């Protein structure tokens, strides 16, 4: 019984393989015998994008959560200035919901559980904190910089950004 099922499967697969793909029939006479005769001349059945692979930054539910609850999207953390600082960016969709992210009373912290560190926003004498604290406007992108002295946080690490009640967990450092 099992042998007959296996044999039928092999015959079916062999027949399907012999037929080929729907678009791989013999070349037309107008195309000529040289064109389309070699496998390299045939177009690939599935077009491939020419861009680099970029993994999803977070799951679809997390993206929806940040959009609906906090009014932000395009969250990202980038390694900048040869790794001495990490730049956290986000785009505001709803200014009233995103107000907590730009509030000066909320101290932002970047946590890397792998390295076991908590990074803070540095404060310069003449400039102040290296973050934007103006009231948010819809459609604009905002940033803040975290000091990474000693380069403890590396590219590819998964980090958490905490600003008051806002928590962005599992962001990948680019």
Image (spheres, grey):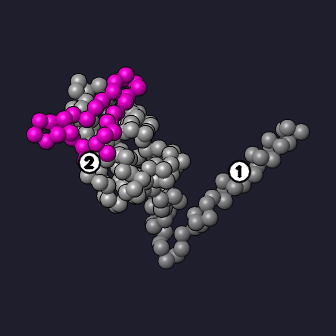
Does residue 38 appear in this view? no
Residue 32: % across, % down: 47, 72
Q: Quadrant of residue 145?
A: top left
* 87 lies left or right of 49: left
The residue wearing badge 2 is 133
* 6 lies left or right of 124: right
Q: Is residue 166 magenta?
A: no
* Residue placed furthest toward the top: 116
Which residue corresponds to the image point at 25% horizontal and 47% vertical from the top-left?
132
Q: Quadrant of residue 135?
A: bottom left
Looking at the rendered structure, which numbered label has been put on residue 14?
A: 1
Residue 136: % across, % down: 31, 55
Q: Is residue 111 magenta?
A: yes
Q: Earlier in the sequence, mark 1 or mark 2?
A: 1
Which residue corresponds to the image point at 66% horizontal and 59% vertical from the top-left?
19
In this picture, which residue range is highlighted in magenta?
103-132
- SS at circle 2: loop
Residue 160: % across, % down: 40, 34
* Residue placed furthest toward the front: 105
User: In front: mark 1 or mark 2?
Assistant: 2
Which residue corresponds to the image point at 69% horizontal and 55% vertical from the top-left?
16
Does residue 22 appear in this view? yes
Residue 131: % across, % down: 24, 43
Looking at the picture, tell me which residue is in the foreground, 107 or 3: 107
Looking at the picture, tell me which residue is in the foreground, 48 or 28: 48
Badge 1: residue crowd in 10 Å (few <14, some 14–19, many ≥20): few
């Amino acid at each position: 019984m099992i042998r007959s099922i296996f044999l039928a499967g092999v015959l079916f697969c062999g027949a399907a393989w012999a037929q080929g793909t729907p678009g791989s029939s013999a070349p037309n006479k107008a195309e000529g015998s040289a064109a389309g005769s070699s496998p390299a001349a045939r177009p690939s059945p599935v077009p491939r994008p020419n861009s680099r692979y970029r993994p999803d930054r977070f799951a679809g539910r997390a993206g929806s959560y940040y959009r609906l609850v906090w009014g932000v999207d395009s969250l990202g953390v980038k390694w900048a200035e040869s790794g001495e600082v990490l730049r956290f960016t986000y785009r505001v969709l709803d200014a009233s919901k995103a107000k907590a992210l730009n509030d000066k009373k909320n101290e932002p912290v970047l946590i890397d559980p792998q390295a076991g560190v908590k990074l803070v926003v540095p404060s310069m004498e003449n400039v102040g904190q290296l973050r934007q604290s103006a009231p948010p406007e819809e459609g604009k992108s905002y940033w803040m910089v975290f000091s990474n002295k000693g380069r403890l946080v590396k590219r590819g690490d998964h980090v958490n950004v905490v600003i008051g009640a806002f928590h962005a967990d599992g962001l990948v450092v680019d």
